[in-house]
């Protein structure tokens, strides 16, 4: 079947799409002939019978790969129009222009077969709905994907082979440059650049922290070299922590050639798209590792030591030691371990003077929180460990003093030498600007003015650099005086005087201690007031040390014992709010002479481990209850019970003066409250007439038990009824029965 026989009037009614794509921006810029051939396919669509106004050119994917790992807006637009049946033919220079992966390619074939859409390339016209054409298109798509795989394999194979010889030219860090031979790497010819890199490694060897090296550069006002592939000259900028850390972790500075430190991994994101990310490989999995490939700033052993120190400076994981040295006074921070559970001890500071201490909260887990294995102050322990450390360090005192003298002079020289190089570089820049200005034609004022301004700027930089150098040389002496040298030698003989000196910081003490001590295992024996320490030194040597702990003494500020004893009795019966009111009514105060509140009562109970009050809905007979509960039980008003308490008819109890009254509920008490008056009981007024005495006299006789009384709680005539002896005549009796 010829090409034209496959094209029908239905195809010609729809649009024709010319898909244009190049895989990268470099191809778009350099392979212009291929791009022009793809655009020329629009003329072929016209030759095949499509009107020119119905021919669309999709070039949105220029510079985008067709491997399927990136989104192609033009391809997606074309797929949408094919699915809607608006396209009669899709033209591409070759199959690889449309898709480089079978997923996109077969999706396009399926849609074209369903919507009766043709596909054309430089070889012919195909109908995906026909078996033979579909078979040929599928083979072309497979070959296109295989071609991409073969090309990538050849390129990567060549790159890996060249990298295995150490000849692959890749970007070098600042301080290293390429030589003339293949794979040759040399130190930067600029002495100031190499001096700045060496200063990073020298300061790190002294300070042990990348951050402290960065702070040292900033405090000294030193600048750091910066270069990039787009800039030919070195730029001097203020150093950043990231740049300092990169210098310390780059193996090229150790004379090692490496390749493949990262690995490209593919994954599918939340939207179902294929993404790529980089993952760092362990050092043992680097494909290319060539030691002594070139001259470095440090050797490989020093580089490995630096990496270990950087790893120790990171925040340690649970139950692991290490971590960067901090500013606190706790000497064993990061190296103290619990002798009970083996966990790393944590540091805390207490009091106004921030006294250090150590604790381990990992013995058992209760309700998601740990109970302390130990909690001990650190003053005596730190002093004992420091004494053992200084005793072990005493033979090296003289050598330490010599190194200290050399280090102090080196610090002076390193800083000033860097500023001398800045002056030399600024002087060269001024001389070069002068030569350029003098070489220009004086009549060409447009150029002369620009070169003159450049020369003046270079002279200003030179003047500023010379002024800074003069200030540094004046404020920082280069050589130690004889007095300073004698002082250092004297301190070297007595390191115990250097240790507590104000000039020795807490960081310095910790770093000195870590040079010999690796771990201190601590066990506290409270009953013996003793701390048993096991010191593990570098090299595996173990030594043991017992440190006596101070005996605990009562707190100088303490709540009165009477108040605590009263609180124990009140907490059984009353909540914290009621207890606070009772204590305040008695004029009692806290240990700090404050009035009591519910919160303060609660804190005092918690400190002395006094249980809190627990109310119950049911009170057994014979137990005490509050006035309110008793009134509710008896069906009376609380005021009635209060009146009977005041009159003395019923007995009440108080835990302490000022506490609420409590009534003991018994059957005898219940019998005093009736619904109807028993026989022989009369009202109070009548009892007064019969007995011929006053109300108060009757109440007193009831209290003494000479008369009996009950309380009627029902009916209109509620109140007290008095039992009058039967022998007394009723002088006012006018009826045969007494209405009560």
Image: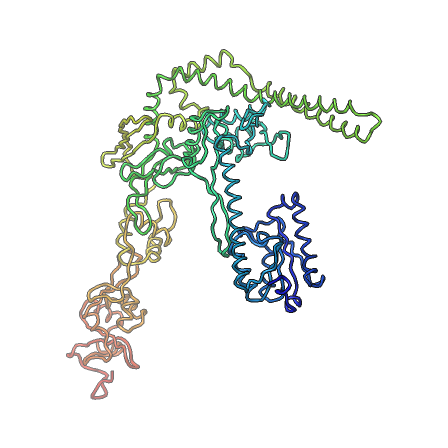
Indicate the position of residue 32 as horizontal and vertical percent values.
Answer: 67, 46
Q: Residue furthest left?
A: 727
Q: Is residue 356 left or right of residue 100?
A: left
Q: Nearer the viewer, residue 318 or 8?
A: 8
Indicate the position of residue 695 as horizontal and vertical percent values.
Answer: 27, 72
On screen, residue 339 above or below 8: above
Q: Nearer the viewer, residue 131 or 35?
A: 131
- The way the protein has been coloured in the rendering is rainbow
Q: Quadrant of residue 328?
A: top left
Q: Quadrant of residue 432?
A: top right
On screen, residue 347 above or below 296: below
Q: Quadrant of residue 194?
A: top right
Q: Nearer the viewer, residue 392 or 307?
A: 307
Q: Quadrant of the N terminus?
A: bottom right
Q: Residue furthest front?
A: 1
Q: Quadrant of the C terminus?
A: bottom left
Q: Is residue 715 left or right of residue 419?
A: left
Total numbered badges shown on the rendered structure: 0
Q: Nearer the viewer, residue 161 or 235?
A: 161
On screen, residue 78 above or below 486: below
Q: Residue furthest right?
A: 443
Residue at 44% across, 36% down: 286
Residue at 37% across, 20% down: 496
Indicate the position of residue 503 as horizontal and vertical percent values.
Answer: 46, 24
Indicate the position of residue 704 as horizontal and vertical percent values.
Answer: 19, 67
Q: Is residue 585 left or right of residue 459?
A: left
């Amino acid at each position: 079947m010829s090409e034209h026989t496959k094209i029908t009037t239905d195809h010609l009614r729809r649009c024709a799409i010319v898909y244009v794509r190049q895989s990268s921006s470099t191809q778009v810029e350099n392979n212009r002939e291929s791009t022009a051939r793809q655009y020329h396919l629009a003329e072929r669509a016209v030759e095949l019978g499509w009107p020119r106004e119905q021919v669309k050119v999709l070039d949105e994917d220029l510079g985008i790969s067709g491997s399927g790992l990136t989104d192609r807006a033009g391809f997606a637009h074309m797929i949408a129009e094919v699915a809607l049946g608006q396209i009669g033919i899709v033209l591409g220079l070759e199959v690889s222009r449309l898709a480089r992966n079978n997923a996109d390619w077969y999706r396009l074939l399926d849609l074209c077969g369903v919507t009766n859409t043709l596909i054309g390339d430089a070889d012919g016209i195909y109908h995906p709905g026909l078996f033979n054409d579909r078979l040929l298109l599928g083979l072309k798509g497979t070959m296109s994907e295989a071609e991409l795989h073969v090309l990538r394999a050849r390129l990567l194979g060549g790159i890996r082979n060249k990298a295995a010889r150490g000849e692959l030219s890749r970007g070098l860090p600042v301080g290293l440059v390429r030589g003339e031979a293949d794979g040759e790497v040399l130190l930067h010819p600029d002495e100031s650049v190499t001096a700045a890199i060496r200063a990073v490694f020298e300061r790190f060897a002294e300070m042990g922290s990348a951050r402290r090296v960065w702070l040292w550069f900033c405090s000294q006002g030193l600048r750091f070299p910066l270069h990039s592939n787009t800039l030919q000259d070195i730029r001097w900028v203020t150093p950043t922590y990231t740049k300092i850390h990169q210098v310390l972790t780059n193996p090229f500075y150790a004379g090692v050639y490496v390749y493949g430190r990262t690995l490209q991994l593919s994954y599918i994101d939340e939207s179902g798209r294929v993404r790529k990310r980089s993952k760092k490989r362990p050092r043992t999995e680097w494909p290319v590792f060539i030691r002594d490939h070139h001259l470095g700033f440090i050797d490989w052993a020093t580089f490995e030591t630096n990496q270990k120190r950087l790893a120790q400076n990171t925040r340690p994981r649970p139950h692991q030691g290490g971590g960067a040295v901090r500013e606190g006074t706790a000497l064993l921070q990061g190296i103290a371990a619990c002798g009970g559970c083996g966990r790393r001890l944590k540091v805390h500071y207490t009091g106004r003077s921030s006294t250090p201490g150590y604790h381990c909260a990992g013995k058992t887990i209760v309700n998601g929180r740990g109970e302390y294995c130990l909690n001990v102050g650190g003053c005596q322990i730190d002093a004992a460990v420091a004494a053992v450390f200084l005793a072990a360090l005493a033979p090296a005192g003289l050598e330490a003093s010599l190194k200290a003298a050399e280090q102090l002079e080196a610090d002076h020289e390193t800083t000033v030498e860097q500023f001398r190089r800045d002056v030399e570089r600024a002087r060269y820049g001024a001389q070069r600007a002068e030569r350029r200005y003098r070489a220009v034609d004086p009549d060409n004022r447009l150029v002369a003015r620009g070169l003159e301004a450049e020369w003046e700027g270079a002279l200003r930089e030179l003047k500023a650099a010379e002024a800074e150098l003069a200030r540094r040389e004046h404020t920082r002496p280069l050589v130690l005086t004889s007095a300073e040298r004698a002082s250092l030698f004297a301190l070297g003989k007595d390191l115990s005087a250097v240790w507590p000196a104000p000039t020795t910081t807490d960081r310095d003490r910790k770093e000195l201690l870590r040079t010999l001590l690796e771990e201190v295992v601590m066990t506290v024996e409270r009953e013996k007031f003793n701390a048993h320490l096991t010191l593990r030194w570098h090299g595996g040597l173990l030594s043991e040390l017992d440190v006596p702990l101070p005996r605990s003494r009562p707190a100088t500020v303490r709540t009165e014992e009477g108040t605590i004893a009263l609180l124990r009795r009140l907490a059984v019966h009353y909540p914290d709010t009621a207890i606070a009111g009772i204590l305040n009514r008695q004029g009692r105060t806290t240990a700090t002479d404050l009035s009591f509140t519910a919160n303060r009562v609660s804190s005092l109970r918690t400190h002395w481990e006094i249980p809190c009050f627990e109310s119950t809905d049911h009170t057994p007979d014979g137990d005490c209850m509050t006035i309110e509960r008793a009134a509710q039980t008896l069906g009376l008003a609380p005021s009635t019970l209060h009146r009977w308490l005041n009159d003395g008819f019923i007995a009440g109890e108080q835990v302490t003066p000022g506490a609420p009254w409590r009534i003991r509920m018994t059957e005898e008490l219940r019998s005093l409250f009736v619904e109807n008056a028993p026989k022989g009981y009369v009202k109070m007024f009548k009892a007064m007439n019969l007995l011929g005495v006053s109300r108060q006299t009757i109440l007193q006789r009831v209290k003494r038990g000479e008369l009996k009384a009950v309380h009627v709680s029902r009916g209109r005539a509620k109140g007290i009824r008095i039992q009058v002896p039967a022998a007394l005549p009723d002088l006012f009796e006018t009826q045969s029965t007494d209405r009560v």
